[in-house]
Image: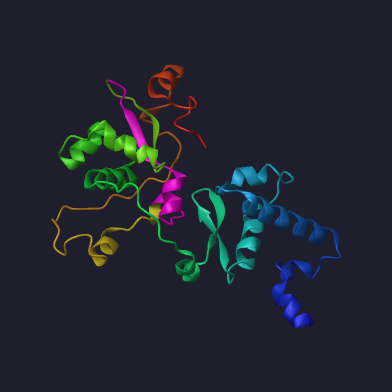
Amino acid sequence: MSNAVEANVLPFPHLLEGADSGPATETLRMVRIVEAMIFASREPVAEKAIAARLPEGTDIGELLADVQMAYANRGVNLVRVGDAWAFRTADDLAFLLQKEAVETRRLSKAALEVMAIIAYHQPVTRAEIEEIRGVVTSKGTLDVLMETAWVRMRGRRKTPGRPVTYGTTPDFLDHFGLEQVRDLPGLDELKGAGLLQSQVPANFAVPMPNDDDDLQDDEDPFTLDDVEELGLLTPGGAGDE
């Protein structure tokens, strides 16, 4: 194999140039650890999980950038999913790997409407969803969305009755190919895609989605009583990350 071809095949040629020196060798080792952790995981790997396996003070962002650059022109790319990372088939090759599958469940129009409201207005309560939709929202609709793992219970609103607040999950981002909730389409993009009429009310606006996973000032965390009542896995929420 010629040097030119070998340089194109080796995964991190820019790091190998100084690999005889101690710092360069250590950097290459850590980059390979990051690559291996993400490759071996069935789910997107959170940055904090990667950092836990590396020396304290390591620049995780720089290591991830190295891996992302190395796979930029390959059949799989390193992509960000919320605060986690995963390898995914390159966009221009995805059609080759698609397979026909029987769709066992289609989301109803009501479920799609509720999903959109949660995505754009989170954290949001069931009563707030109903106010926006103008109709009653059944518990079954929310249950279906939680079964898909696209929606989770976040906490309780600090208002009388302490209603549950809902938000999206990393699975929602992963399924729709989003890095963060703020990547959801805005008004112009929705109109361009034909999802909104060209003429919309003057006071109509698409809210800016909230990316913060932490509870807001008007939210309380779940208690141990909530865990039993709502069937949560931990006091922090439904299936805490």
Is residue 36 positioned above or below 13 on the image?
above
Q: Give the residues drawn in magenta, as a range.
A: 161-181
- Total marks drawn? 0
Residue closest to the eye, 111 or 63: 111
| Residue 172 place in picture, x, y as percent | 41, 48
Q: Residue at x 61, y 48 (%)?
A: 41
| Residue 60 place in picture, x, y as percent | 65, 52
- The reply to whether residue 124 is in sight is no
Q: Residue at x 46, y 55 (%)?
A: 179
| Residue 125 place in picture, x, y as percent | 29, 33
**Residue 49, quarter of the rendered image:** top right
| Residue 16 place in picture, x, y as percent | 78, 68
Residue closest to the eye, 16 or 141: 141
In the displayed structure, does residue 35 sit left or right of residue 17? Answer: left
- The reply to whether residue 24 is in sight is yes
Q: Is residue 162 magenta?
A: yes
